[in-house]
């Protein structure tokens, strides 16, 4: 059980590591919110599992056909799972039992080691296996190999027997119900979907012994109880034997949009948090393996004796510096842009144009250095800023193949339970701290990054907030201007904390960063264009060519010289940071209004935040 926004991430990271240990037909998701996982054969939804079973059945029947051919047995044993079962019983088992009777121990003397391979009845079937199958070194070793071969054959027919029901049930719905009730051993669903489908599950005779609830601290109490009641009692007692709740009550609670229920009814308190508050014994995890040790220091003060797992110190990715950036985490101060800090086009719909442009500029800079865009996520604390950043990305770089889009642009609340290598965080507010004053939201924001965290905020506002002092005292200990190393491409061999061999450049404001990224992009385009012209240059025309052909080539070359170096997809310098008429070499510019992302301009913007 999990919140739907987290279930996909949980399945992706967990089952990618454990799939070699899990039989695929016993894994099933029963939720409309779960998407197809991005690795082979991992559409673990109901109909995805049905399709897998049908495809796997055909593959196994082909193996039965090949085995039948190798044994020289007439007929069509691979027609159905039922005929395959009879073939195994009367043809395969009889040959195996006869083989065992010939090579088993006779009295105190061991049979000749050559008899194990000589009498083995499935030599031809395993002809495509690495040869020789039998090593001939000892009787025990060869017998173990023979028994392993038979286990492989037996597994084929065991799976076909499990898939036999798919031949009798014709509709996909009936097959999916059968898999859910009879075959699936691991079923993933959201608590909301469990509530919606409880009647259907009880009617099907759904049974389970164990429940594992992930992100239990973010689930309402009523949503926590419903998954416990998805089956009928057995002899007056519940079948449920084990209930495991995993969560972090130091992070965000369930979202309650009604303020009266939230504040006066304490409805935002989860059952997990209630258990912790009343003193129910807990097992506390005291080591993290997600982030660098330096990033962990930003939030480990909230926990009791939180350390790091050994791989955080041993793996190269945690000890290597972030290419093109001097620090692995940094707080970047963003002053008013054109005299405006935060804006509120609609009630509680907060935006900050300067921070949004700065965040997108840093994202573009990282991608131009070679960072994969899917390893970067952009987070913010308000829905208004989220929509503004998305608008800017669509205008600046969304369709540019050299840059692309970040993995996600979302709010801190929505990103709870997820992670990414590099996080760019915009705190938006310039007049009041807002709901980041809730330390639980701060912990979530600080703990999403694995390798790099870059925060854009009005430092003078947030550093004076008492609740945020433990984290911001570490952030303000480093320079408040962005320090970049433009000549250091991704990936780098520089160790984290090591003095760079390349020149460090200090970015003092957003217009400077936007102009720098534009010049960097144009230089990259011109370099690539020159390389392509050099690499693809045709050999000189031969003397025998006609004068007409040579004249045509001369005209084509003249036309190429008149074509500008950049294409239509070239991201122009940020309208908020530089004018189109400004020469590329000029760094101090007069900001102009940002045409691409006027705060709160569109009718499609979401209503007030209910984070």
Image: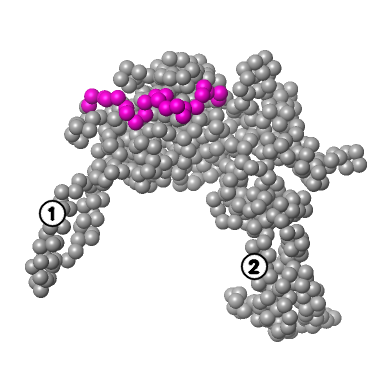
Residue at 69 percent across and 55 percent down: it is 172
Determine which quarter of the picture holds residue 329: top left
Q: Residue at x 20, y 57 (%)?
A: 534
Q: Marks 1 and 2: which is nearer the front?
A: 1
Q: Is residue 531 magenta?
A: no
Q: How many marks?
A: 2
Q: Please identify the quadrant where the N terminus is shown.
A: top right
Q: Nearer the viewer, residue 594 or 119?
A: 594
Answer above or below: position of 214 versus 561: above
Which region shows up in magenta? 589-611
What secondary structure prevails in the magenta region? loop
Instruction: Specify the quadrant of the image occupied by residue 123.
Output: bottom right
Instruction: Name the residue beneath numbered marker 2.
Output: 59
Indicate left or right for 132 with 512 as reference.
Answer: right
Q: Mark 1 or 2 closer to N-term? A: 2
User: Which disc is residue 136 wearing?
Assistant: none
> Which sits in the foreground, 168 or 181?
168
Q: Of the numbered discs in the image, which one, if any, rests on residue 558? A: 1
Q: In the image, is residue 374 above or below residue 259?
A: below
């Amino acid at each position: 059980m999990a919140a739907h926004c987290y279930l996909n991430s949980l399945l992706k990271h967990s089952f990618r590591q454990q799939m070699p240990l899990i039989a695929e037909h016993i894994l099933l998701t029963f939720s409309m919110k779960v998407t197809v996982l991005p690795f082979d054969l991992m559409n673990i939804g109901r109909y995805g599992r049905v399709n897998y079973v049908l495809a796997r059945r055909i593959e196994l029947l082909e193996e039965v056909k090949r085995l039948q051919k190798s044994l020289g047995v007439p007929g069509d044993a691979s027609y159905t799972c039922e005929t395959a079962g009879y073939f195994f019983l009367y043809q395969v088992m009889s040959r195996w039992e006869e083989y065992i009777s010939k090579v088993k121990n006779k009295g105190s003397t061991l049979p000749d080691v050559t008899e194990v391979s000589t009498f083995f009845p499935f030599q031809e079937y395993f002809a495509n296996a690495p040869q020789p199958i039998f090593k001939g070194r000892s009787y025990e070793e060869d017998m173990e190999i023979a028994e392993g071969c038979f286990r492989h054959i037996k597994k084929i027919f065991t799976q076909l027997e499990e898939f036999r029901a798919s031949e009798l049930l014709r509709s996909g719905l009936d097959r999916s119900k059968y898999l859910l009730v009879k075959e699936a051993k691991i079923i993933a669903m959201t608590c909301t979907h469990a509530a919606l489908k409880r009647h259907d599950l009880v009617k099907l005779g759904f049974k389970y012994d164990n429940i594992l609830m992930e992100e239990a601290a973010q689930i309402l109490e009523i949503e926590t109880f419903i998954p416990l009641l998805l089956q009928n009692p057995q002899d007056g007692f519940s079948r449920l034997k084990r209930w495991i709740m995993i969560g972090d009550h130091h992070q965000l609670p369930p979202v309650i949009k009604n303020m009266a229920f939230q504040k006066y009814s304490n409805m935002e308190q989860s059952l997990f948090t209630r258990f912790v508050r009343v003193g129910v014994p807990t097992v506390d995890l005291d080591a993290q393996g997600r982030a660098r040790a330096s990033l962990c220091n930003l939030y480990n003060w909230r926990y009791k004796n939180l350390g790091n797992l050994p791989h955080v110190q041993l793996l190269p990715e945690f000890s290597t510096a972030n290419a093109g950036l001097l620090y692995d985490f940094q707080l970047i101060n963003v002053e008013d842009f054109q005299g405006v800090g935060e804006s509120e086009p609609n009630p509680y719909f907060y935006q900050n144009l300067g921070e949004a442009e700065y965040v997108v500029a840093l994202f573009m800079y990282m991608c131009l250095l070679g960072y994969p865009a899917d390893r970067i996520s952009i987070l913010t604390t308000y829905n208004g800023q989220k929509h503004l950043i998305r608008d800017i990305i669509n205008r600046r770089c969304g369709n540019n193949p050299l840059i692309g889009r970040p993995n996600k642009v979302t709010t801190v609340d929505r990103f709870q339970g997820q992670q990414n290598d590099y996080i760019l965080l915009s705190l938006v507010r310039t007049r009041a701290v807002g709901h980041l004053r809730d330390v639980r939201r701060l912990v979530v924001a600080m703990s999403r990054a694995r390798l790099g965290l870059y925060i854009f905020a009005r430092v003078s506002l947030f550093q004076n907030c008492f609740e945020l002092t433990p984290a911001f005292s570490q952030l303000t200990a480093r320079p408040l201007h962005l320090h970049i190393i433009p000549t250091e491409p991704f990936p780098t061999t520089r160790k984290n904390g090591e003095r760079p061999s390349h020149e460090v450049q200090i970015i003092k404001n957003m217009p400077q960063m936007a102009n720098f990224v534009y010049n960097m992009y144009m230089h990259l385009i011109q370099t690539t264009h020159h390389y392509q012209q050099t690499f693809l240059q045709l050999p000189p025309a031969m003397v025998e060519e006609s004068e007409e052909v040579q004249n045509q080539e001369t005209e084509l070359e003249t036309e190429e010289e008149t074509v500008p170096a950049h294409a239509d997809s070239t991201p122009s310098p940020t309208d908020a940071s530089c004018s189109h008429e400004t020469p590329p070499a000029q760094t101090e510019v007069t900001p102009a209004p940002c045409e691409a992302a006027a705060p709160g301009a569109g009718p499609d913007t979401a209503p007030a935040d209910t984070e």
